[in-house]
Amino acid sequence: MLVRRFIYTFLVSMIPAIEIKGAIPFGIALGLPAPVAFAAALCGSGLIACFLAFFTHWFYEACRRRHLLPGFTAWMGRITEKHEESFQRFGPLAIFAYVAVPIPGTGTWTGSIIAGVFNLKPKRILLSVLCGNVVSGLIVTLVGNGLVSMVKSIFIQ
């Protein structure tokens, strides 16, 4: 049963916009211990980061050259334009900070895609995204455990 919940959490963490920020509370809600939910979510989102690190730049350039997926290329153009100054100034550290903040719109998918569009080397993408993911996951786990403990203490006495 534990393996099944681990796999569910792993798979949920691969969904864009949910990622590690939603998979950890999901895993805890399924009954996984917080460290196990954290590990499952980190593994799933890490797998996505590996895929995106190696294929994003190639895919973006192919779409741009062939005028495919104009919505995607325009969206990426807006995001990269918005973050270009901080990326030029801080490089991989900017990607780390972008991924580490556990708010909607930041995370493995967008961080990896932005780094790929900026043509950062895959090793640097992985390092900055995975480290940011660990920080984000720790924040979510600690906040989630605190809220669960608080709710339990209020309602279960």
Image (cartoon, rainbow, N blue to C red):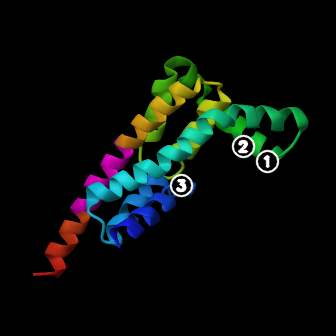
Mark 3 in CB contact with mark 1 (< 8 angstroms): no
Q: Quadrant of residue 56?
A: top right
Q: Where does the image place residue 76, in percent across and percent down from the top left?
A: 70, 39
Q: In terms of sequence position, does the residue under pointer 2 or pointer 3 come before the other?
A: 3
User: Mark number for residue 14?
Assistant: 3
Question: Residues under labels 3 and 1: Cα distance?
Answer: 22 Å
Q: Nearer the viewer, residue 137 or 9?
A: 9
In the figure, 36 relative to 105: above or below?
below
Q: Where does the image place residue 45, in percent across and percent down from the top left?
A: 49, 49
Q: Residue at x 19, y 67 (%)?
A: 149
Q: Residues within 10 Å of mark 3 (few under 14, many from 20)?
A: many
Q: Quadrant of residue 23?
A: bottom left
Q: Residues within 10 Å of mark 2 (few under 14, many from 20)?
A: few
Residue type pointed to by label 2: Trp
- Which region is colored magenta? 135-146
Q: Is residue 43 visible in the rendered structure shown here? A: yes
In the figure, 89 relative to 104: above or below?
above
- The residue pinned by badge 2 equals 75
In the figure, 7 relative to 120: above or below?
below
Q: Quadrant of residue 134?
A: top left
Q: Nearer the viewer, mark 2 or mark 3?
A: 3
68 horizontally vs 106: left or right: right
Q: Nearer the viewer, residue 9 or 132?
A: 9
Q: Where does the image place residue 54, in percent across and percent down from the top left?
A: 63, 33
